[in-house]
Amino acid sequence: MPRKARVVSKTNIYHVMLRGVNQQIIFEDEEDFRYFISILSMCRDICGYTIFAYCLMNNHIHLLMEEGTEPLSIVFKRICDRYVYWYNHKYERMGHLFQDRFRSEPVETERYFLIVIRYIFQNPVKAGIVSKVNQYRWCNYQAYLGVKDFTDTKKVLRCFAGINEFEFFMNSDANEKCMDISSVKCTFISDEKGKEVMWKLTGCTNVAEFQKLERNHRNLCIQKLKGAGLSVRQISRLTGVSKSVVGRL
């Protein structure tokens, strides 16, 4: 079937999401997070886009951004190509890292603009990683509190009477629906804990190491991970093995 045409925003502002293949982890350590953020900053100067909010989760990324001189299709080709080349070299792997193309939705009203940015910053809270939005390191929330970076905070802050009102809004309960993936739901065993379990049971610390295992040994390790309480979806994220293969073992 042909791909569904991307909906064009009248404001050129979009909520964009990238995710790993089979929802596998795309950031293994702090260096990975930092490098991807540096790419966002570097490509901004090339592509002319504006980022209002970003949040990097272990296996997916959310951004609120305004399209610049280049269309998003070219923007994300630049961003993804740079990161995948670096990631594959670092972890001695080959092949795709991101799931298909990026997903996007138009943001055309001030109300939805604020809903999306709150949703993005609350992602780690709803995933059970932190209890407050200002505690998560791999987003640009601190830029709104005065820490300078490459993102644009003026458009958002103009919508509030002051920083206290902004923080109250960003930390308030929200029930609105935004574009997302099912993996945001918090599992009984967090991915961080799951990585510890994987290391103890298999000796592997990341996806690349696991994928180098001999097939029979790999399958035995997957069975051990399932026995330890990790879900099929979670094992797939942590090991890079497809859900169908994990499910059959």
Image: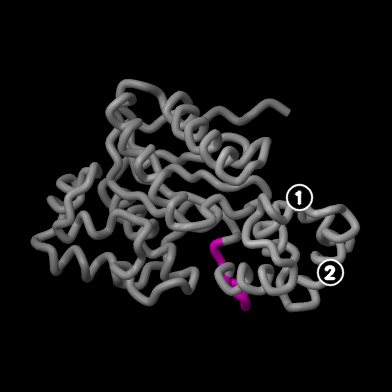
Quarter of the figure that contains the C terminus? bottom right
Q: CA distance from mark 2 to mark 1?
A: 17 Å
What amino acid is found at the position of numbered circle 2 in the picture? Gln
Q: Is residue 10 left or right of residue 76?
A: left
Which corner quadrant of the image does residue 42 belong to?
top left
Residue at screen point 22% across, 71% down:
168
Quarter of the figure that contains the N terminus? top right
> What are the residue bounds of the magenta stretch?
184-190
Residue at screen point 45% across, 24% down:
74
Q: Main secondary structure of the magenta part?
A: loop
For disc 2, the marked residue is 223
What amino acid is found at the position of numbered circle 1 in the picture? Lys
Residue 113 on image: x %, y % = 30, 49
* Local secondary structure at mark 1: loop
Residue 159, compared with residue 80, is above or below; it is: below
For disc 1, the marked residue is 212
* Local secondary structure at mark 2: helix
Q: Give the mark nearer the N terminus: 2 vs 1.
A: 1
Residue 192 on image: x %, y % = 55, 69
The colour scheme is one colour
Residue at screen point 49% across, 38% down:
83
